[in-house]
Amino acid sequence: MATPYEKLILDRTTSTQDEVWARFDSTPLLVAARSQTRGRGRSGARWSNAPRALAASLGFRPHWPASSWPRLTLVAGVAALRALGDRGWDITLKWPNDLVRGSLKLGGLLTEASGDTVVAGWGANLFWPDAPEGTGALLDSDPGPEAGVEIAERWAGEFLSLLAGEPGDWPRDEYRRRCSTLGRPVTWVPDGTGKAVEISMDGGLVVDTETGRRTLTSAAVTEVRDRGSSR
């Protein structure tokens, strides 16, 4: 049975994350906007949306223990790919929170928590004919103003369905299959280089380094990129 949720669809807002934080009560709440002016990414980075974009945030109270919340961003990424369906067949997930096609970033996920509440956000470029260097879009033609809202609603349904299970049931294998970070030499901020070899059960990135194997957590690492890449 699908988890019920409330939804609010806006033409324009500063940030869907902020809208959810201001409005959330107890029932899961999806806020989707056709445009946002101050979307933010991980570590407070500014997120710039394409002319045709998806901006959505979902507030909820997980029944999972807080110790398992670091994997929520990864689960949200799997839900995003499922929501895209056939449109997302060539899109991959860059650990921990980006959607990419090849070397082009298409969107990102953000998970914030306070007390017993989590707000997960998703921003993605749907169509951007003159995108900045290093940035791409999900679609090659303009899908119209309602496409982002429709995808956001499918994402919320997929995400809540995955969260209805237990933490150990999260779709780790599905994430690993769609994770373009695995198998690549990577560097990370603040202080390391290695080869990404696995996704841990807790959602960490397992890397082989010159001094041995270690697991990176999104809380301790501010950026991971392919070795030799400028992004």
Image (cartoon, rainbow, N blue to C red):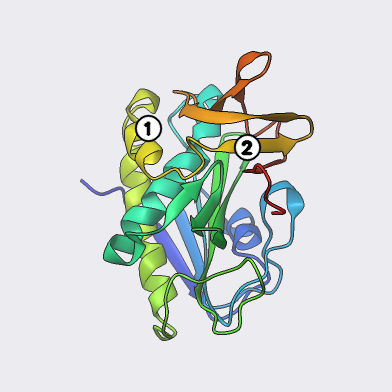
User: Badge 1 local density, few (<14 within 10 Å), some, or many (20+)?
Assistant: some
In this rendering, the answer to whether 10 lies above or below 221 is below
Q: Which residue is mark 2?
A: 186
User: Where in the figure is residue 187, as x and y percent of width and height?
Assistant: 68, 37
In this rendering, the answer to whether 229 lies above or below 146 is above
User: Where in the figure is residue 101, as x and y percent of width and height?
Assistant: 47, 60
Helix or strand or loop: what does disc 2 sit on?
strand
Helix or strand or loop: what does disc 1 sit on?
helix
User: Where in the figure is residue 200, as x and y percent of width and height?
Assistant: 47, 24
Left or right: residue 160 versus residue 48 is left
Q: Which mark is residue 147?
A: none
Q: Which residue is mark 1?
A: 172
Callout 2 amino acid: Val
- Whichever of callouts 2 and 1 sits on the residue coming sooner in the sequence is 1
What residue is drawn where x is 68% and y is 32%?
219
Q: CA distance from mark 2 to mark 1?
A: 21 Å
Residue 204 appears in view: no
Callout 1 amino acid: Arg
Residue 100 appears in view: yes
Q: Nearer the viewer, residue 87 or 10?
A: 87
What residue is drawn where x is 54% and y is 84%?
129
What residue is drawn where x is 44% and y is 84%?
145
Quadrant showing the N terminus: top left
Quadrant showing the C terminus: bottom right
